[in-house]
Structure formats: structure tokens, C-alpha cells
Image (spheres, grey):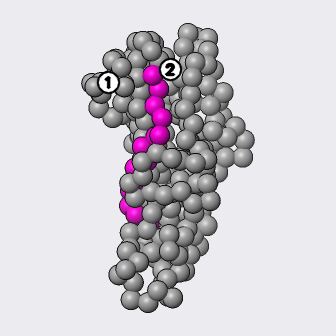
Amino acid sequence: ASMAGATWETSVSIGEAVSGNTTVAVLPLKEGTYLVKAEDSSGILSAVAAAISTKQASALAWSPLTSVQEDDDFTGAHASTFVGSLMLQLRGTGLIDDAPDFDSIVSLDYYGGVAASGTYDFAAGMDLGSVQRVRLTSTLAAEIVSVNDLIDSRAALVDTWADFDGTAGASADAWVEVREADDDPAGTPTWSDWRRLDSAEFQARAFDFRCILTSADPAYTIRINQLRVAAANL
């Protein structure tokens, strides 16, 4: 969501990767900075990311309608996630009861390494009161950090490390998903399947949201300090 000063380590994915012979990539329109890196056949990323910023300007005049905000408390349902220092993040995979030596545990939150994935269900959804046409846009501000910065503490193979020094590796990701319904969410609504939400237009009455967090390296976690969804109409 940053218009300036965006870095690879504080970014999350948007859209899908395209092949090297592709000259055009179509992505959802959001306010912020888009960062792009090239990746070779062995999975090595370019050292520097290209950047372009946008204000989500469009030909149609969308007006703010309503929004939901989960930060700073994140009081929704957690599955392999927790809140620490007012940030949503992945839990460790180990059980304290299984630790052979409690005093040797470097981090209680990440004992056993960072979980490969987790899900956070929003505490609140949206009920527009009637079926309406709206544009939904997610806002997700995060940082990716190494929680096991000692070589002996990293469980993944060294060939898979994005960065040997542990300072520029971005081995984690997060995104928002949404499902919709045309009937009253307080009753027995018929929900659609979950789908990724960056920015898209919908025609429905109610919306339910969740956030998916992932880590490709048990030494890295993603910490989310801003998690919101805004609705706008014409």
C-alpha cells in the first residue's frame, strides 16, 4: 500500500507470475507500489526489483461505502496464527511439552520452526442490507523477517535460501480471500467458494473474509500490521 519507499521485504504477492517470454502482465488495480523481479529457471531472483506506483485511479467515480478493519487486535479465529506485538503472524510448529530442554529454547513463539501456513478468519464481515454492485479492495501491510537468524537454527536446505545473510530473503507471503452471499448472513446464507481478493467488483449482499499466511522457509515469518477491506460503490 506504500506509494513510496516500498521494499521487497515488506511486500506481498499480487496476481500470478508470468513466463519469461511474456511482455504483458494483467494485475488487479490497487493503490500502492508494484514491485517486479525476474526469476531464472533455477529459482534465483534478480537482485533489484523494478517499481511502479499507482493511486488506483479509474474512469468510474467510486465512492467509499463501508469497510472492515482487523488491526490492531485481530480478534477473529486463528489457525496456526497468533498476535504478537500487535501483529498477526504464523505460529511455531513445535510443542513446548516435547522440548527436551526448556532453557535451550531460543523463541517460545517459533519453537520447532515457523508453520508453513496459517489462516486468520476476520472477526467481522460485511452486510450491505441488499444485493448491491460494489468494488472491494484489500489492504495488507506486512514485513517478512527471519526469526532464526543463526545458520544452525535454519532447517531448510541452504540451496533453497533466498538470501544467505538473512537480510533480504522474502520467503513468506500473505493474501486476503473473500466469499459472498446474496441472502442475510445472520440466517443460513449460501456462501460462494473462497477466492483471492486484491481488488475486484462484486454483486452481492454479504461478504466474509479471511487471510492466508504462508512461509516457504521455517526460519521466516510474515508479520501483518494492517489488514483491512474497503467497499466502494458508484
Badge 1 density bin: few <14, some 14–19, many ≥20, Cα 10 Å: few
Please give the residue where the numbered disc 1 appears in the rendered image: 187
Return the x and y of residue 123 as percentages of the image width and height: 47, 40
* Extreme residue in the right direction: 4
Of 110 and 86, the residue lying toward us: 86
Closer to the chain start, of discs 1 and 2, is: 2
Give the SS element for disc 2: strand
Which of the 4 image quarters holds residue 149? bottom right
Label count reads 2
Residue under the point 36% across and 30% down: 179
* Extreme residue in the front direction: 187
Give, as a single range, the part of the protein colored magenta: 114-127
State which mark lies toward you, 1 or 2.
Answer: 1
Position of the C terminus, as image quadrant, is top right
In the rendered structure, which amino acid carries the disc numbered 1? Gly
Return the x and y of residue 63 as percentages of the image width and height: 61, 15
Can you see residue 33?
no
Please give the residue where the numbered disc 2 appears in the rendered image: 135
Separation of marks 1 and 2 at Cα, in angstroms: 24 Å
Return the x and y of residue 72 as percentages of the image width and height: 61, 47
Of 108 and 171, the residue lying toward us: 108
Can you see residue 91?
yes
Q: Is 56 a magenta residue?
A: no
Rendered view: 185 above or below 149: above
